[in-house]
Amino acid sequence: MIIFFIVIVLLAFWGLMGYNALVRKKNSVEGAWAQIDVQLKRRFDLIPNLVETVKGYAKHEKEVFEEVTKARNMVAQAQNTEERIDAENQLGGVLGRLIAVAESYPDLKANQNFLQLQQELSSTENSIERVRRNYNDKVMSYRAAIRQFPTLILARLFNFTEEPYFEAKTEERENVRVKF
């Protein structure tokens, strides 16, 4: 009877410790996503200023401006993490095209406002890359915890589900083609 009681106490203790470890890992993933969200918000807020600056010089590049606006709206309308990741990846792609358009205008490249916005955007993109890597590390650790035995039992019992990685889209993994 005493052995049975000790086994029950040990199982309860293991369950409590395992559950708390899963909660810590889940909170770590959520905290890492919040850091990404801060940087993405900063980029989101820079875009209208960047677009307006470029518009003043490149009035006939209407298609690029529409793509940027559309991608920015997709970010604003994203309902969950997966949709947000996809929308942010699309936004990053069209921002690259916007900067490429800007490179075609020497007067714009010399504009102080544009240079400052471009520098802020570059700094933000570097920050996004850093926090994105941190987020993916947290997701990897969390996923490992919910897949490994014996915490797998607790994860399924308490409905801990996988979080998505913040991955680059297929187009972003391809080599950039430079033509002269």
Image (spheres, rainbow, N blue to C red):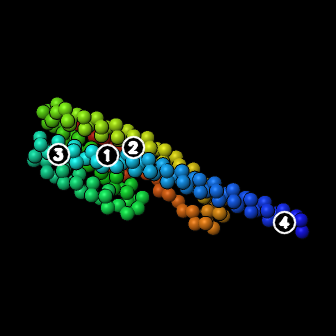
Q: Earlier in the sequence, mark 2 or mark 4?
A: 4
What residue is disc 4 on? 5
Tell me, for residue 32, which label it has, or none. Answer: none
Q: Are marks 4 and 3 in contact (CB under 8 Å)?
A: no
19 or 103, nearer to the observer: 19
Distance, label 1 to label 2, CA atoms, is 9 Å
- What amino acid type is highlighted by mark number 4? Phe
Q: Quadrant of the C terminus?
A: top left
Distance, label 2 to label 4, CA atoms, is 51 Å
- What amino acid type is highlighted by mark number 1? Arg
Residue 156's place in the image compared with 138, above or below, is below
- What amino acid type is highlighted by mark number 3? Glu
Q: Please tell me whether mark 2 or mark 3 is closer to you in this view.
A: 3
Q: Residue at x 34, y 52 (%)?
A: 88
Q: Are marks 1 and 2 in contact (CB under 8 Å)?
A: yes
Q: Residue at x 74, y 59 (%)?
A: 13
What residue is disc 2 on? 128
Q: Earlier in the sequence, mark 1 or mark 3?
A: 1
Q: Position of residue 107 (x, y in %)?
A: 12, 33
Q: Residue at x 14, y 45 (%)?
A: 55
What residue is disc 1 on? 43
Q: Position of residue 43 (x, y in %)?
A: 31, 46
